[in-house]
Each structure stands twice: as structure tokens, then as C-alpha cells.
Amino acid sequence: MPRLKDPQSLGPRWRAVLDDCVAAIAWSGDGRLVAAASAAGAVAILDGGSGQALLRLAGHPQGALCLAWAPQDRLLATGGADGTARLWHPTSGHEVAALEGGAAWVEYLAWGDAPYLLATAAGKHLKLWSADGRLLRTAEPPHASTISGLVWHPQRGRFASCCYGSVRLHAPLKAAPADVFEYAGSLIALDWSPDGRWIACGCQDATVHLWEVASGTDLQMSGYAGKVRALAWDPTGRYLATGGGADVTVWDFSGKGPAGSKPRILSAHLKPVSHMAYQPQGGLLAMGGPDGIVSLWNPLKPARPMGLARPDTQVSALSWRPDGQHFVSGHTNGDVVAWSVPSEGRGFGL
Amino acid sequence: MENQRVPVTVLTGFLGSGKTTLLNRILTEEHGKRIAVIENEFGEIGIDQALVVNAEEEIFEMNNGCICCTVRGDLIRIIGNLMRRKDKFDHILVETTGLADPSPVAQTFFVDEEMREQLKLDGIVTLVDALHVWQHLEESKECQEQIAFADIVLLNKTDLVTPEQLAELERRVRAINAMARIYRTQNAAVEIDRVLDIGGFDLERALSVKPTFLEPEYPFEWAGIYHLEPDRYILTLQDGPDPAMALVCLPVPDPGEASLEASQKQAVRLFSGRAKLREPGQGLTPQAALVELQLGEAGVKRFALEVTEAGDYALFTQHRPEEFALVLAAEGGQALQPLVERIYEAGHTHDEEVTSVGIEMPGAVHPKKLSEWLSRLLREQGTDIFRMKGILHLQGEERRYVFQGVHMLFDGNPDRPWGSKPRTNQLVFIGRNLDREQLTREFAACLA
């Protein structure tokens, strides 16, 4: 067997530094700005092309936990350990509103685009807010335990949230959940397939649990080395990449689906992958974790990564530029690094 | 890697036992440690510090239904978040609610691989309200379990009870948990070093506090040291509750505590051997032998003790002397008083449900036999075994093998080399319905 060459090094396009661990990071919809929240609480607005710091928002006194850009980048929402979500004007830095999440930590945020509103998750409470900060609804009843995932599905027009024991679907303007899927386990990661068909959850008990949204039938993937903290659907909804160990497992949902099929295994990391994101357009997959490795894959060619870098500081956040040309990683030492996608073929050197 | 793991201390104790007082001390006293505190949902600390987090207990059972995989989901989430800023603190302290079962919180640091890699359970500290604990012990299994899980027990509010009540409480706590270090406190005033960074893993340090705790309950209830000149002495006994009483009389170098400790070990061995029977009127001499006085007949019974050399002599009796109004006197003389005496608690006189079993045994352990035994034991009795700890001499291993476990979960590693120290095995089990003889026999079968 020919010896595989080392994967091509990923080259950093630019770097920036925050004052503490990067708690959350997101590229704006137009690709011009990167918002990066620090675990110490401040939020930096960086130039997406150069990494230059444009604005420093006061953020959250007890530390920031999450952030999300509003549709058309009209606002930036941040959540923190001060129990609030805050809305910021992204170019002036003006604070538009501070919203009481209902518990000590606001851990998840998601914007809906039709209608245009914000969902916040804090403790057991899911709240829905208008873009100017008015409380529209509090989901009832409260979740059974602390909410551990929140996403918006634009085609389905629903928020999905998860906690220990269940996944809930919420219509934007209703208090009661539109649907509930149950599983007696601790759900710690959530993603809804872009085609709307499947909701996938990573579980503490080293499994991945899936529900077919239309029918509510569920299926489970087991055999993971540990808890599954990271999972990601590709933009078509055909492939689901799952963490749960140093190796990432990619399942194919076409045809008869994943049951009984053999997944692709992406093997380059030394510790369980904690962050993973598919390229918004195209099929590439970026990932990182506590081993301080950032890698980029074409999962259809699983033999080795397209590119790999070893910043030697744990990856704590990951986000793609919407055009898929670059992605950015945040690290526990405060580093923010933007990476370019190597042109396909170059560096394979076969 | 081991040294980079952040130590975690778990603080348990019923409402009113003084947890908040202790937490406030830890947060305000100058001790040079930076401590992140996760207080319970009813916590009373003002949360104006970034590293104090209020947590609502969320107990997550795993889908397989195994009780031992039950963890605190909230801790995994919160500590996961805290660990991103681990340069900001050196230690994590987790306060549980008063009625908390300590298993899920302890198990969290074994079950979740991320927790296990980044953190180590330094110790479980249980506060006990010296006045009200009796009622809790009777009414709640959680109270017993909190004591059983502890590495450190603080008997707090000692000013509210008499010294006798306190001594009785300490014996009760000791009967549940032979491994814990016990401190008596008022207003939870204890040196911080005694509760944080104790190295809960290090059984040796626990041993250094009470080196004999591994021994089973003593086969004798009383010992005294007398100074005796060469003479003929008479042991006089009245009618008592038993038809016979075993005793050992040994020469000792001096009437000090150390001599008593040394001779007590010898006496334990002698008591396990065969006794020479003595009828009233017969004599005995001080020597390394077990003697059983026959007390079946009614009335006063006398036994002669012949002493040929002046010196100090230790007397160990199976029962308390007052049960037989035992008197030692020179023939025709006054009753002698011992220079020192000690009363031994019989370990199981009042059938405690939760107990400790210690095993100390020399010999090299066969790793495969040990692992098979432990897996079977934990599979069959894991729910009853709250904690276990041990230092073992594994065959072919130059380093000490140190382990601890919570229910069915087990964490063990070789640590430092034995060096010139005698290689031996020490294990402690704490739990319900433990069978000391069975555990000892089964462990002995694991020796190579």
C-alpha cells in the first residue's frame, strides 16, 4: 500500500485575538463581518476580509455564551451568563435591547426569518421576541430540563429545541409546542436536516438519535466511543456527519437510508471532535476539537483531509463564510483564525 | 497529564449542617487558592463573583437504565463552560442540595469522558449537624449515604452537644465510614487545607490519620496497663453476662500509648488463636497466649496471676471489666488501678446497615484475577457498594496501583514506585450489606 502523504497544510488567511476564550463566532450573512464573543464577556466585530477589529461591544458582564446574526445582518444578538440576551446594532455598536432570558445563562439563540423574530433559550425557558425586543411568547410548559439545543428551520417555519428526554418543535407565535419527540436520554447536540426531513440529536449515552419529522418514527445509531457533542447535516440533507470520538462518522440518508449502511469514517483527530460545520454551498466539512487540530474534508474522499492545521490551542467555535470560500475557528486562548479553502485537486499530488 | 486535571471538591450535608457557612469561609478567607463554586439552587451566596455559578440539580439517567450511569447533567454543562476559562481558577467546589443522593454527582466525574479527562474528584466533604443528625440518620437513607461517601466528615455545631454525645456520634459515623477523616467544628471553622486538595485518591494519607482503621472490629473490649512487682496477684470476678471470658496478659516496655498500640496488634493475633482454658482457682502467667477464664459456676471466682519480673503489663479482656466487677489486686492487698486503659467498640454490636470493610494483606495481586473479581463484584453488588479505594501491589509492577470507585465505576492507575516501602495491599469498601469475610476471602484468592 502506498504511503499516504501528509495532508496539505491549511493556511491562515488572517488572525485576530480576543481577551479570553472564544465562546461563539459567526460570519455575517453578507460575509463582511465576523462577530466573536469572548468567555470574559466582550464581543468583537471583526472585518471579515482582514480580521481587523472594527468594534468592541460591552457584551455580558459575567461572560458571553452565544451569538446569532439577524436575517440580512440587521442586528446581532448575543447571550450571556448575566441571564440576558442583548441586541446590538452591528455597525454603530449601539445596544438596542436587553432581554431577560428567564434563567442564569442564556445559552442558545436562533433568529426566525418569517416572521422576523428571535428565540432565546435560558434554563428551561424558551422565549420568543420581536426584533425590537418585545416579548411575544414564552413557550409553555417550560422544558423538562435545561435546553441543550436550538435551531430554526426556514422552510418548515419552526424552531426545534431539545433537552433531556425530548425534542420540541415550536411555531413562531404559539406558546404550546407544535410537536414533541421523546427519548429517555440526555440530548446534547441538535441539527435539523436542510430538507426538513430529519432531526438528529447527539446524546450523552454515546448514541445519535434521529426522528423523521413527518411520521415521528425514530432510529438510533450506536457504537460511538463517547458522547456525541457535534453533528452537522450537509446542505442537501443527504449526509449527516457525527462526532462522538476522534473519528467522525458520515452517514448517507439517500436511498434506503443509513440503517444497515456502512458510513464513511474521517480519521485525523486525536481527541473527540467538538465542533463541526458543513460548507453552506458545496460538500466540504470543517472540524476541530480539544486536540488543537483544525481539519477540512471532502467527506466523499475520506482517506485523508483536504487540509489540516495544528494551531495547538483547543477549538471552541467554528463558522463558515456564507459563500463557502473561508471558514473561521475560535480557540480557547482567544485566537480567531480565518482559513481559506484550498482549491480542489491542488495538494493532492497523486 | 494527571497534574493538569483540575481538582473538584463536593460538599454535601443536610440543610442546617453549615454548608453555606463553610462556603462563605472558603470564598472569603485568604488561602491563595482561586476557587470556582457551583452552588445549589437554594444557595445563599451573593452571586456577584464571576466564578460562582448557581446550578439547579438535573439528574440524567441513561437510556440503559443503569443506576450507576446516573449523572448530573447540569454539572457537565456548567463545568464544560467553566473549563474554557480554566486559567482563571485552580479548584472547583460543588455544593449539593441537603437531600442530595451523592452518587450522581460523584459518578459525573467518572462517567463523562470529558469530565474524567479534565477533572479529578479530590474529595467529598460531608457536613454533619451534631445536634440533629441522629434524627436524619433514622429517617433518611441520604444522610447515611452522604456520610458513607465522604472523604472528610465535619462534625459541626459541636457546641450544641455534650462531649459524650459527640463521642457517640463520632463512633456512629466511624461505623458507617471507616475511611473518612473526621474533624469536630463549630461554625464550620476548619483550616481550608484540611478540606481542599486533600488528594481523596491517596488512601495512604487517610491511613496516616487513623492507621488501624483497616483492622476489623477488635476481639476485645477493654485494655489496661498495670505496673506489677514480682508477686502473686489475684483476678477476682463476680457473676456476669457470659459463662467465659478470654484475656491476654502481656509484658510491655512502658505504659505509653505506643506500647499499647503495639501490644494491641499482638493481642488481635493472639485472640484469633486457640485459648488455654482456666478454671477458677487455677493460675496464669503473663505471656503471649490467649487464656479463657471459665466463669460458669455461680459466686465469686478467683484466678492467680504469677509475676516474676517487675514491669508494666497489658491486660486485654474480651468483655468490659465492669460486666464482671473484675478486680486485680496483690494477694491480700488493695485493688490496683491501671496506668492507662482503653475501651474498644465492638464494630457490629448495633447492626449498622451501611458499613466499611477494610482489607490489609501482603502478597502480589494477579491483575487478571483481580479484574475478574472486581467486575463480578461490581456487577453483582455495585448498587450496594458506594465507594471503594485501594493501594495494591500488582504482580510485576514496580509502582503502587491506586484505585477508587463509585458504585460500578472504577478509576485506577499506577502511581509512584514502592521503593523501599513494604509492598502490601490495602482496600476499603463502604456500602450496604457488605460481607467482610467473603470480601476478604475473595480478595485473598486474587493473590498470585
Image (tube, rainbow, N blue to C red):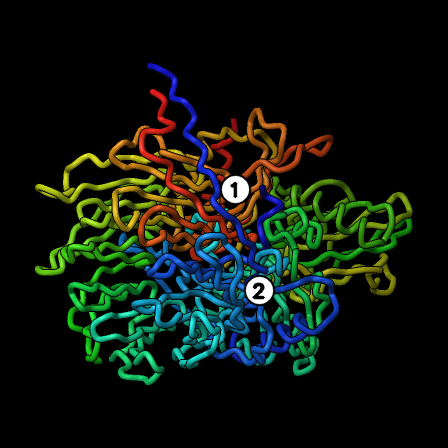
Q: Give how far across and how far down residue A195 sits, in percent.
A: 15, 55
Chain hosting mark 2: B
Q: Is residue B428 something one can see in this rendering?
A: yes
Q: Is residue B353 something one can see in this rendering?
A: no
- What residue appears at the point 50 percent right and 54 percent down from the top-left corner? A51
Q: Which corner quadrant of the image does residue A113 belong to?
A: bottom left
Badge 2 element? strand
Residue B342, above or below B47? above
Relative horizontal placement of residue A346, taking residue B435 as reference (left or right): left
Q: Which residue is mark 1?
A: A311
Label tally: 2
Relative horizontal placement of residue A151, taking residue B24 as reference (left or right): left
Q: Give how far across and how far down residue B198 sits, in percent.
A: 65, 55
Q: Which residue is mark 2?
A: B93
Q: Nearer the viewer, residue B68 or A349?
A: A349
Q: Give how far across and how far down residue B349 sits, in percent.
A: 54, 62
